[in-house]
Amino acid sequence: MRWPVAMRLWWQLLLGALKDQPMKWGIATLAIAVGVGLGLAVHLIHQHALEQFNSGVRQFAGVADLQLLPHSERLPESVLETVVQWPEVAVASPILELQVAIDGMERPVRWLGLDVFTAALVTPNLLGQATDQGTQASEGNIPMLNDRNAFASPALMQALQGEQSSAPMQLRSQHQGKTRRWDLAGTVPAAGAGQVLLVSDIAAVQAGFGLLGQLSRIDIKLREGISPETFTTQRAGELARLGRFETPAEQGSRGASVSQAYRANLSILAMVALLTGGFLSFSTQMLAVAQRARQWALLAAMGCTPSKLRMQVLFESACCGLLGGLAGVVLGFALAQTVVSQLGVDLGAGYFETSTGQLRMGWQNAVAFALFGGLATVLGGLAPALQTGRMALQQRLRAGTEEAGLQFANRAHWLGLALCAAAVLSLWIPPRGNVPVGGYLAVAFGLFGGIACIGLFVRWFIPHPPALGHLGHLARARLASTPNLLAVGLSGVVASFALVVAMHVMIYSFRHSLDEWLNQVLPAPLYMKPQNQQTQIFPQDVQRKIARLPELAQAEFWGQQSLILDPARPAVELIARPIATEAASARLPMTGPTIDTPQANTLPVWVSEPVADLYGKRTGDTLVLPLDGGVSVTATVMGVWRDYTRQHGAIVLPKALLAERHAISFDDTQAAAWPRKGVTVGEAVKAIQVALEGTALQDRVDFAEPGEIRQVSLDIFDRSFAVTYLLEIAAVVIGLFGVGTTFSAMALQRKREFALLGALGAQRSTLLSLIAREALLASLLAAGVGMMMGLAFAAVLVFVVNPQSFHWTMNWHMPWRDLAVMVAGLLIMSTATVMLALRGKLGKDLLVQLKEDWA
């Protein structure tokens, strides 16, 4: 099969372009592949996580139409009597859920207490099946009703079995200092793949773990013809003080919103590489269009229309993008598989408690992301394509007219200034959800606007020298005579360098702000916590025993629990700790003004920045906290504090006042201790360990000094931003090779000029020195423009994007040393790349190149 002549010509011209500048095209393709790969990996991982999360929600909801959930942690069992009497309710199934430590398991296990009779009608897939069910049934026993029986999911059964030939027949649970043995009576065969859970009768769970009269939720199946919306409208007000109604779909939406900002920012990081590839494609094609002007002229003279010439340029761009897109699809799937197998599906940020499962990539995802790569390069090739027919035929047939083909760049700065103005105006666009639309638009407009203004910077900072007194003057004169060619060649480099500077300054500012924050929120010399805070607490008798130790001057204990203030948003964290109004500013890093006296009959509280931002609360405002048991606490916001550990908000309550006025106390899971003068931290730790002997916390408490906590926190920060660091390195490398190959290509097109200089007596070393000076001067300009743009983008990221995405603020810190290293690396590497690329190509038959102007 023979291809059409036009198609063969397209391929021949494409192969010629690739042969002429293989490195340049290769780097543009690599940048596209990295961008597509990162974007696809983030998409696949989170898609897999949400699928598992929603699958779990559907499984645990069964056929329930609604769920009655507490505002915080527990519902009183008495509410079940109210719900079952409503005529709209067909079945109401009570459920008690908690995390329990099991001997032999590293992590706590999800344990469900079910009413076997109602669960059979709503969540039959959660019922346990006994291994000897036939025998027990014949004797009139129902295994699920035995208060010693527990039923394990297949995944948990496999984990308990380990290397043994069969699973153990008994379990031992550890919960809040109490140990209990259970008979492993069977399995939960219908539990979802990878779900690690235990199921028992609800009465056994309540009695076994000291939760009599408490429920986690009530699953409700409505009668035929009753819609959840109608039921909620009619009945929500009757139980508003105790809880709220939610559909399984609403829970899935809240699960997606938990990681929305995190996903958006990772996707933007992928776009950094994709934009870099697009600009490198633009730079490559624009230079190629200018340098291949005579080729276009010859094709035009042979009857090729301007539209076909433009299609050739777009065809070359699309081939580069599609190749990069296909490589990115392979890279993205491999990266996603690696992350899922090593870190699970929570993106390394702890957003989802789900199993790994099998990652799937539909053909739609593969095609869509591969097309993203093609789209990026086609957009980058639009401007070069438009230039192919704008030069006069007779002008294009002459050599040395590359600059003439880029005269449009003389006016590009007006468009650039307009885009920069649009970037400034975009900063006033409010966020959509947790996505800072205005901030991202400002960066995008500023990036394109800054690139369009590069020609103006070239004319400002590289003027024509008054005379050619030495080689440096000659290098400057050459660059000043081709400002548009230089501006186009630097566009990809400036884009990548600006984005790298922006990301690095933001991360550096964040890291140092975190360090400063840790220094303020860790005032005690020693901190303690149970090894498993989900299942172990500091009992009151243990607290009194530690507080009375003569080695300690002071000991504080505090706990926390979650609270839903808005069903559409994730829960905030309530922290009940010993704190006095006059000492709050010393303990909490306040971000604004504070007040000293709460409103009458209200509790003083201090809210973190996310609470203030998401719920519109400011210092002096009142806030109603619906706690368990129908208790409603009215509080006054005494101040707003910075918190980098709870993205969705935290509220600090005074522990003593909460217990005194509302008879509410949280389970204490954290502690701080101040040794007496003359007592070392090590001596205090030994005294506390002695005090814990004979208690349930013996050998089960972790101790840490502030320096250790700080280092662990910073290590976690570095791991969380490891992808960003890798992207920075990749962008710097791409930028370095981009500038090197750009100048190499520009220099190779000047072989006639070098031949003339050689004929006048210039040595090969002189020519290399000239090119090195040009590359150094142009790289310095690229670094300066990129630095200026990058710092502007960093300000947007620090003061707009982060507060709108994560609802916390940070201080501005400048990484002067890192930026100096980056600039020096750009200058050295770009110059070295040009030298290496041209070292073997100068001085070989250069006089022959002079004949190109004789035609």
Image: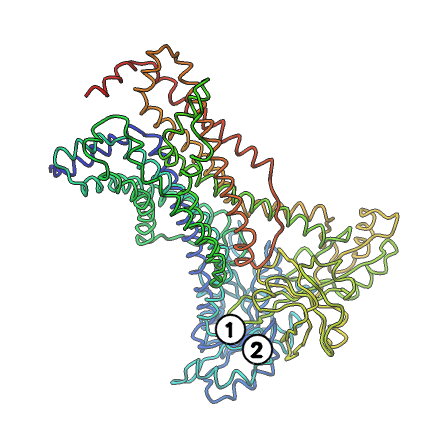
The image shows residue 33, relative to residue 613, as above or below, that is: above
List the single residue furthest toward the front: 466
Give residue 292's position: percent from left, percent from top: 25, 31
Q: Closer to the camera, 643 or 229?
A: 643
Quadrant where the N terminus is found in the figure: top left
Please tell me which residue is depicted at 62% across the width and 73% down the height of the picture: 206
Amino acid type for the residue under numbered disc 2:
Gly
Q: Is residue 734 left or right of residue 245?
A: left
* Mark found first going from the N terminus, 1 or 2: 1
Q: Closer to the camera, 717 or 586?
A: 586
Is residue 371 visible in the rendered structure shown here? yes
Front disc: 1 or 2: 2
Q: Which residue is mark 1?
A: 136
Q: Closer to the camera, 819 or 553?
A: 819
Quadrant where the C terminus is found in the figure: top left
Give residue 10's position: percent from left, percent from top: 19, 37
Q: Is residue 294 left or right of residue 799?
A: left
